[in-house]
């Protein structure tokens, strides 16, 4: 099988799970790296800049939440997709993962074929050939190539889903996006996320941009402030 143009980092403290995942993913042509805790995950991300990280939540030395937060602060790399692969399915665990900068959440155990399908779906959103583009408001610039925004002249690096959500809203100031439209465009039709996923990401954006730019249209969705 031909090698695919993506590398994947697997992070789990259970060797059996790592070996099983690595075997099945490498069979599909992906380059795979492995780490056994959050500290190793940060170092491997810095060294190899994977497109996708599949990371357990509960690990020794540093758990997945803290590792995700640290990875989101790394400079000089294109930010990877980070998906938590864990047996914990509680809502608060999912919210914590998204708040830390995670992009998705997969509950173990998962069948290899379903996991590979999920990986393909995730990587379709990792665009290696994206180009720069600017948004309509003159105070906001979105750089798709280097994956950062400038807001009133201040450079801000955002987790991938926050970046895509802000880009979608700000590219059409004044347009109201329904929650279904946001989920379909930012997370994809095949991604199953909790009801509060959008709210968590909107809250995180407001913490960084202020409360005056993203408006809630009650019972409908969200819109970005016009010029």
Image (cartoon, grey):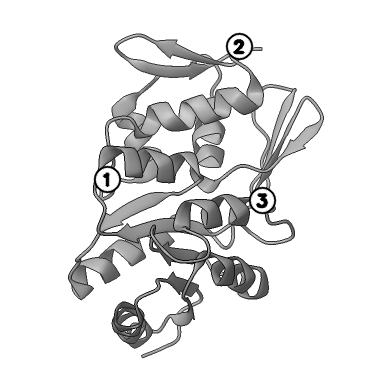
Mark number displayed over residue 202: none
Residue at the right extreme? 153
Residue at the top extreme? 218
Q: Which residue appears at 33% of the width and 46% of the height? A: 188
Considering only vertical position in the picture, is 5 above or below 114?
Answer: below
Q: Residues within 10 Å of mark 1 (few under 14, many from 20)?
A: few
Q: Nearer the viewer, mark 2 or mark 1?
A: 2
| For marks 2 and 1 on the same chain, the one whose residue lies earlier in the sequence | 1
Rendering coords of residue 214 (x, y %)? 53, 18
Q: Under tag 2, what secondary structure?
A: loop
Q: Residues within 10 Å of mark 2 (few under 14, many from 20)?
A: few
Q: Under tag 1, what secondary structure?
A: loop
Whether residue 120 sits left or right of residue 36 in the image: it is left
Whether residue 87 sits left or right of residue 212 in the image: it is left
Residue nearest the viewer, comparing 4 with 218:
218
Q: Which residue appears at 56% of the width and 35% of the height? A: 167
| For marks 1 and 3 on the same chain, the one whose residue lies earlier in the sequence | 3
Provide the residue designation for mark 1: 189
């Amino acid at each position: 099988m031909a090698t695919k143009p993506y590398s994947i980092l697997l992070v789990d403290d259970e060797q059996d799970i790592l070996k099983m995942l690595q075997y099945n993913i490498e069979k599909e042509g992906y380059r795979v790296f492995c780490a056994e805790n959050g500290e190793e995950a940060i170092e491997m991300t810095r060294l190899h800049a994977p497109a996708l990280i599949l990371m357990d939540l509960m690990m020794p030395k540093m758990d997945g939440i803290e590792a995700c937060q640290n990875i989101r602060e790394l400079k000089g790399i294109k930010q990877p997709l980070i998906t938590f692969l864990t047996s914990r399915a509680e809502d608060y665990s999912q919210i914590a993962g998204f708040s830390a900068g995670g992009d998705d959440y997969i509950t173990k155990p998962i069948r290899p074929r379903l996991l590979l399908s999920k990986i393909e779906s995730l990587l379709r959103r990792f665009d290696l050939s994206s180009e720069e583009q600017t948004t309509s408001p003159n105070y906001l610039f979105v750089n798709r190539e280097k994956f950062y925004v400038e807001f009133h002249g201040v450079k801000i690096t955002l987790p991938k889903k926050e970046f895509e959500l802000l880009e979608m809203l700000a590219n059409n100031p004044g347009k109201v996006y329904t929650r279904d439209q946001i989920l379909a465009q930012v997370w994809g039709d095949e991604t199953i996320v909790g009801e509060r996923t959008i709210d968590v990401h909107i809250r995180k954006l407001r913490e960084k941009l202020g409360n005056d730019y993203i408006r809630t249209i009650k019972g409908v969705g969200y819109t970005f402030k016009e010029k």
